[in-house]
Amino acid sequence: MRDPIGKKAAELKPSGIRKFFDIVAEMDDVISLGVGEPDFDTPWAIRDEGIYSLEKGRTFYTSNSGLKELRTEITRYIRRTLDVNYNPLSETLITVGGSEAIDLAFRAMINPGDEILIPEPSYVSYKPCAILADAVPVIIDLKEEDQFRLTAEEVRSAISPKTKILVLPFPNNPTGAVMRKEDLEAVAKVCVENDIYVVSDEIYSELTYTGEAPCSIVQCPGMKERTILINGFSKAFAMTGWRLGYCCGPEAIIRQMTKVHQFAIMCAPTNSQYAAVTALRDCGSEVAKMREAYNQRRRYLLHAFEEMGLPCFEPFGAFYMFPCIKEFGISSDEFATELLKDQRVAVVPGTAFGDSGEGYVRISYAYSLENLKTAMGRLSAFIAKLRASKS
Amino acid sequence: MIMREQILELLERNSRMTPAEIAVLLGSGEEVIAGEIKKMEEENIICGYNTLIDWDKTGADMITALIEVRVTPTRGQGFDNIAERIYNYPEVQSVYLISGGYDLLVILEGKTLKEVSHFVSSKLSTLDSVLSTATHFILKKYKDDGIIFDRKKKDERMLVEP
């Protein structure tokens, strides 16, 4: 029999989280700090709208691009928050989560051999999606001394004549890093000078704790016409299971993305699209409440780390902390595995998000304070043990 | 002022939270928080610290009644005078002045049906300004003070996710 498996799929490295997941699944009484989604339920008004749309029998396909009503709300939302205008009909596409938009953007823009710059540590799907689109991923290692921000110099030195796209994954999973306006402006300048496109994954844009207005690279001069802005409902509105994201960008690119989307997906879930209209129209205050709760937990963890002497830069976005565990002289993977076995606390090794995550672990604070308190007690005991065994 | 509201929101959800804990969550100092709480207690913004109890789950006999009361307001005093005469009874839990079909909503806790009806017939109805009463007994409490009583929420998320 011939080998049923194609080379490209076979050579794709499985997610580093998989192995860890299998260990955790076998254990009882684990306190997990390993999730990548909100602990809140979707606000009731949104769920209610979803139920209502089912009752009304809205169970058909929508247009490939998505409900016009929703696309209009999205462009209004972007105007409100970023003061940038997109045409809801020609420059907006509703996708199945932000992840689909990443995949589509690469497929629509890449010729075989083009290079995509991917800052790491970052979300696990950029690299595989780049490979599947026949691009060559070029990794930029972000550094803690820069607060895991991407610098213009790092972009400049990674550029080659083949570079076509820069991925901008901020606010960042797993580090929690955010880019300031001046950081974005510096990177934007390099992109314009070198004619590079940007795929800006802003799925955590609603979850920042600097107290400043949100900013995006599309606000920088010359960038709107060379950026695909990706966002979605999962993190801001606690709607992960609804599988709904969107992207905005230049008409020519969105048209090609829509074509691929049409053949692969047809359209995003209709029910979710109706519910999302309510999310954007009526749920701003619910988002603010969740943001405040995350911020309180963030402060709690920073305080707890400080008390146990675990170094961690202060992250201002998403719902992750990325403490440094280098002092213990073991790998992230070993640290996470030992912590799980010894104290039954699950965290994700930093290396799951790229080689530059070595020496760090990702701790999610999408958990209740009570949960976090118990987990910090156990983490503290574990660290004390490690220190005692070393000395 | 914003800080005050944030303190109040935390205490409203969990009155056992200490000033030190609140200070960490709000990024402030323990003395600052303790000072604000003390001031708010003095200003009667914080009027007390209660515990929310689902009495149904205990063996204790407890019955709650909502009583709609129509009254004649007194000259110069409006409804305050009659409200005071009602809220001074210790078994009265809450008294609200209400717009609409009646004037005062009285929430009463008693041990038995007999006890509540005795209060209504002998104490409440006999007050001069009371014109009429309508008593409703609460059969089941689903949610009180923003807390859903019988929700056992299990975390159904996967344990590790990218």
Image: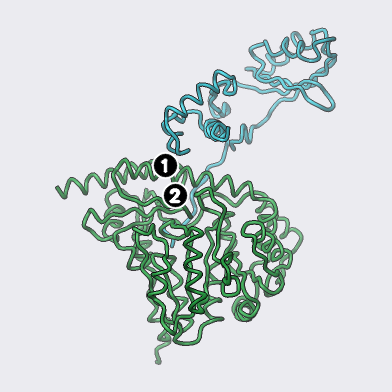
Chain colours: A green, B cyan
Q: Chain of mark 1?
A: A
Q: Nearer the viewer, residue A267 or B74?
A: B74
- Residue A365, numbered circle: 2
Chain letter of mark 2 equals A
Q: Specify the label residue A248 is tagged with.
A: none
* Pick the front one: A79 or A324: A79
Q: Which residue is pictured at 72% across the width and 24% down the height?
A: B66
Q: Are marks 1 and 2 on the same chain?
A: yes
Compared to residue B115, the image places residue B31 above or below, namely below
Q: Quadrant of residue A254?
A: bottom right
At which x and y percent is residue B161? 44, 60
Q: Is residue A238 above or below residue A22?
A: above
> x, y percentage for residue A62?
71, 71
Residues tagged 1 and 2 counted as in contact (Cβ below 8 A): yes
Q: CA distance from mark 1 to mark 2?
A: 10 Å
Q: In the picture provided, is A77 more to the left or to the right than A189?
A: right
Q: Where is mark 1, residue-wise? A: A300
Report the amino acid beneath label 2.
Tyr
Task: Find residue B14 and report its horizontal and vertical position in percent.
Answer: 51, 32
Identify the secondary structure beneath mark 1. Answer: helix
A330 up-or-down from A284: above or below: below
Name the kind of residue labelled 1 in the image.
Tyr
* Identity of the residue drawn at 43% across and 87% down: A4
Q: On the rendered image, what quadrant is the N terminus of chain A found in? A: bottom left
In the current view of this chain or complex, which residue is farthest to the left? Answer: A391
Q: How dense is the environment of label 2, judged by Cα within 10 Å: few (below 14), some, or many (20 and up)? A: many
**Under tag 2, what secondary structure?**
loop
The residue carrying pointer 1 sits among few (fewer than 14), some (14 to 19) or many (20 or more) residues within 10 Å by Cα, namely many
